[in-house]
Image (tube, helix red, strand yellow):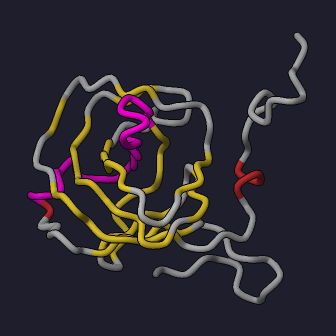
Amino acid sequence: MTIDRRDPYAGGYGEDRANYPRSPSQGIFVAVLHRIVPDRGLRLIREHARCIRGGEIHELILTEEETAIPGAEADLIAYLGFIEFTKGGVVVAGDRFFVNNTEIARVAGYDETHMPNHMNIVVRGKGLVPGFDRGIMLGDRFTIVSPYGDRRFTATTSAAP
């Protein structure tokens, strides 16, 4: 089998590939959703990283499915809401997702069903509870941070927001 050297995902995507210094991305909830869907059929793209600009609005969807990884599907989901990025950056599968300084999930991947309108950012965490029932409010803050620290400094793990 020949691997296309021009395709960065052809040889796999180990955790070491995501271990580079990145600024946190952050913003606010601009809509809070309240549905659970048992058979959504989200198709996560195989790319692990997405660049997101400040000002973009994307949908945030939670799953508990351990198999929800880049290139796979997610069926049982809870809608959390729509989020506006006030500070963009590079978001990578495995990044930590915080709401009001509390970690609720890790980024699982991205579904492009509604592009170019918005992207579905799928996060994996415990408790299949929609945003409304979690008590998320309009204007609540979110932060996405790398689980890795910058090895050039003495801290070796990224801090909570």
Residue at position x 39%, y 48% from top?
124
Q: Quadrant of the N terminus?
A: top right
| Res. 155 image quadrant | bottom right
Residue at position x 31%, y 60% from top?
83
| Res. 48 image quadrant | top right
Residue toward you, 56 or 83: 56
Q: Is 70 one of the magenta-colored residues? A: no
Query: Which secondary structure dominates the residues rendered in magenta?
Result: loop
| Res. 103 image quadrant | bottom left
User: Is 145 drawn above or below residue 69 in the view shown?
Assistant: below
Residue at position x 47%, y 45% from top?
108
Question: Where residue 70 sits: x, y (%)?
Answer: 55, 35
Q: Is 120 one of the magenta-colored residues? A: yes
Q: Which residues are magenta?
A: 111-133
Outermost residue to the top: 1
User: Is 38 drawn above or below residue 48 in the view shown?
Assistant: above
Question: Where residue 35 sits: x, y (%)?
Answer: 12, 42
Q: Is residue 113 left or right of residue 33?
A: right
Q: Is residue 90 left or right of residue 86?
A: right
Q: Is residue 32 left or right of residue 113?
A: left
